[in-house]
Amino acid sequence: QVQLVESGGGLVQTGDSLRLSCVASGRTFSSLPMGWFRQAPGKEREFVTAISRSGSNTDYADSVKCRFTISRDNAKNTVYLQMNSMKTEDTAVYYCAAGIRTYSGGRSPKSYDYWGQGTQVTVSS
């Protein structure tokens, strides 16, 4: 069992920055590929970014590339999402996810096994 707790969401204006955190417990954090997804009202959950177990490999959706950065601190059991130059279309509930299987990770929500409760991010113009 893995517990994930996100924090850092809030209300910002376009162009602002925000950093989300997700603390994991229940399993060796360095064994977990991690991802961030988001879901806007009336839309399906979509991939934002993912990071490998060691942090050496990352992947980003085109919509956030060059604006968002994922990182992890395995000593603190935490994955971060730094969001810069935010846009109104970034408004959504953001979820972190963890995978426990050998081939977990990547862009599909189905490859993750545990999810946080979500944190609301609202970007106003």
Image (cartoon, rainbow, N blue to C red):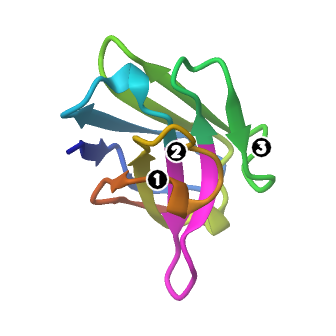
Answer whether residue 91 is visible to the viewer in this image: yes
Instruction: Residue at the far front: name it.
Output: 102
Residue 35 is marked as 2
Give the residue type at disc 1: Tyr
Q: CA distance from mark 3 to mark 1?
A: 21 Å
x%, y% of residue 12?
A: 48, 54
Tell whether label 2 touches label 3 (CB within 8 Å).
no
| Residue at image mark 3 | 65
Residue range corresponding to the magenta coloring? 35-49
1 and 2 marks in contact (CB < 8 Å): yes
For the C terminus, give its image quadrant.
bottom right
> Sequence-wise, which precedes: disc 3 or disc 2?
2
Mark 3 touches mark 1? (CB < 8 Å): no
**Dot 1 surroundings within 10 Å: few (below 14), some, or many (20 or more)?**
many
Q: Residue at x 24, y 42 (%)?
A: 2
Q: Report which residue position mark 1 lands on.
A: 112
Which amino acid does the dot numbered 3 rest on? Lys
